[in-house]
Amino acid sequence: MKLNRLVIALLIVTAIASGFVAGHAIADQPHMQSALEHLRLAKVELEKADRDKGGHRERALRLTNDAIAETERGIGYDRHH
């Protein structure tokens, strides 16, 4: 019985701590997180667009993927320095 209570308490503490860390990770860089969300949405829209764009759609998609990767690296860099 005491073991069950301890496990439940540990699970609750872990859930609360995880929520705090996740919330802090997003809140600490709201502009970078917002930009990342917009870039990901742009990627989805580019993927849905008609393919015949003289190669420009494909290039835009590549550059968007690069921008997503750079934004993620920037977020990671700021968190570690």
Image (tube, rainbow, N blue to C red):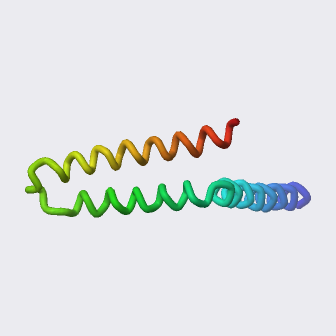
User: Could you say where residue 44 lies in the image, as x and y percent from the top left?
Assistant: 31, 60
> From the viewer's perspective, is 78 left or right of 39?
right
Quadrant of residue 3 within the rendered picture: bottom right
Residue in the picture at 55% in, 42% down: 74
**Residue sticking out furthest to the right:** 2
User: Could you say where residue 25 lies in the image, as x and y percent from the top left?
Assistant: 66, 53
> From the viewer's perspective, is 4 left or right of 18?
right
Nearer to the camera, 13 or 75? 75
User: Could you say where residue 27 lies in the image, as x and y percent from the top left?
Assistant: 67, 60
> From the viewer's perspective, is 11 left or right of 6?
left
Residue in the picture at 43% in, 62% down: 38
> From the viewer's perspective, is 17 left or right of 38?
right
* Quadrant of the image containing the C terminus: top right
User: Could you say where residue 39 lies in the image, as x and y percent from the top left?
Assistant: 40, 57
Total label count? 0
Quadrant of residue 13 within the rendered picture: bottom right
Nearer to the camera, 59 or 16? 59
* Quadrant of the image containing the N terminus: bottom right
Residue in the picture at 57% in, 59% down: 31
Quadrant of residue 53 within the rendered picture: bottom left
Residue in the picture at 40% in, 57% down: 40
